[in-house]
Amino acid sequence: MKSVVIEQPNQLILAERALPEPAAGEVRVNIKLAGICGSDSHIYRGHNPFARYPRVIGHEFFGLIDAVGEGISPSRIGERVAVDPVISCGHCYPCSVGKPNVCTELVVLGVHRDGGFSEYATVPARNAWVIPDTISDEDAVMVEPFTIAANVTGQVQPGENDVALIYGAGPMGLTTLQVLKGVYNVKQVIVVDRIDERLAMAQRSGADRVINNSQQALPEVLTQAGIKPTLIIDAACHPSILQEAITLASPAARIVIMGFSSEPSTIVQQGITGKELSIFSSRLNANKFPVVIDWLARRLIDPGKLVTHKFAYHHVTDAIELFEKDQRRCCKVLLTFN
């Protein structure tokens, strides 16, 4: 089988590898589609501190089960499945409180263990979630990106009367936007970004207002409009955003940090305690695959609005470079297999 392997930073090859056999408790997935994420690019470029090389990248993937290991019913062969990349121990403190995404023995497919940019992959059977026939292949491969939004919104529990502000109209920001509008019916969602084409994507996904903060100062725009956001989501992940969000937020607001920046953020504590703000962080997803599959089945979200490009997997280098360089036209890039 062919696999996309990062041998070391900036060295990507298409390798011929032996067909893997599923171990006890595992299934083998014949992969049909996979999505490129920023973290795949970070591993490729050597910017992910958790990655180990060589590595088959890819943690957003969909396919058909074609073999099962010991202890798994053969009836699962043929199932259409989306794969949750989060593998947890099930017994540490984070797991015991419903946060397997920060398990003390966390393994993420495509980061710590070979992932889905391959013709076949073996995964724990419990991580292979069945996709109903009413959900298309192209929507199924987008389950994992929407679980990130499900994890964020599950923590802050948006309400219809929230005034939400999203920093960043990339994939994380746009999936969260669709969830706020389609699932939680939030009446006012504002999206801020520095690229007009991305703001146009936000409008197509339901944003009530968009602001280009390279052309207008965000604090001035919100002050003039008399807007005090009650829910702020940082999907742009720049260290300067947190203090601005604290300043802009309504009393009793919630702020969510989605990024992994290693740069320090300078904040004033009084701005937090004076308004009794709640600050959340969110990493990966905590058992959100069935939640998103249900949203898709009920047509509450529309992943197709975010998919801008498809490449055959053997053009993966071109696909990643487009994803990295063309932020104006590119949102979600898919790789096709078989």
Image: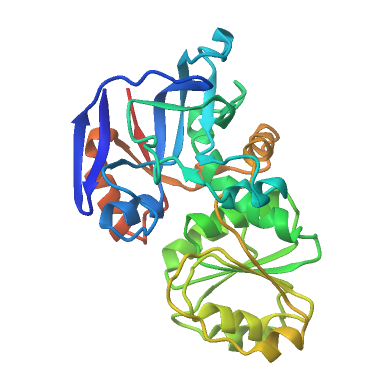
User: Please, is residue 2 above or below residue 100 in the view?
Assistant: above
Which residue is found at the position 28% from the left and 60% from the top? Answer: 325
Q: Residue at x 64, y 40 (%)?
A: 90
Left or right of 7: which side holds 81?
Answer: right
Residue 48 picture quarter:
bottom left
Callout count: 0
In the rendered view of the protein, which quadrant contains the C terminus?
Answer: top left
Place of residue 139 in the rendered image (x, y in percent of width and height, measured from the top left): 53, 35
Nearer-the-camera pick, 218 or 124: 124
Examine the rendered structure and indicate whether residue 33 appears above or below residue 197.
above
**Which of 180 and 188 lies nearest the eye of the viewer?**
180
Residue 28 image point, x, y percent? 44, 21
Q: Relative to 138, does residue 10 appear above or below in the rendering?
A: below
**Quick check: 225 above or below 193?**
below
Q: Can you say which quadrant of the picture contains the N terminus?
A: top left
Where does the image place residue 333, in percent across and percent down from the top left?
A: 38, 45
**Which residue is pictured at 42% across the width and 63% down the height?**
197
Q: In this rendering, does residue 205 appear at all?
A: no
Q: Position of residue 40 (x, y in %)?
A: 36, 49
**Residue 223 visible to the viewer:** yes
Seen in the image, is 264 located left or right of residue 277?
left
User: In the depicted view, which residue is nearer to us: 121 or 79?
Assistant: 121
Colour mapping used in the image:
rainbow
Q: Is residue 325 left or right of residue 81?
A: left
Left/right of residue 281 with respect to residue 63 in the rendered view = right
The residue positioned farthest toward the top in the image shown: 74
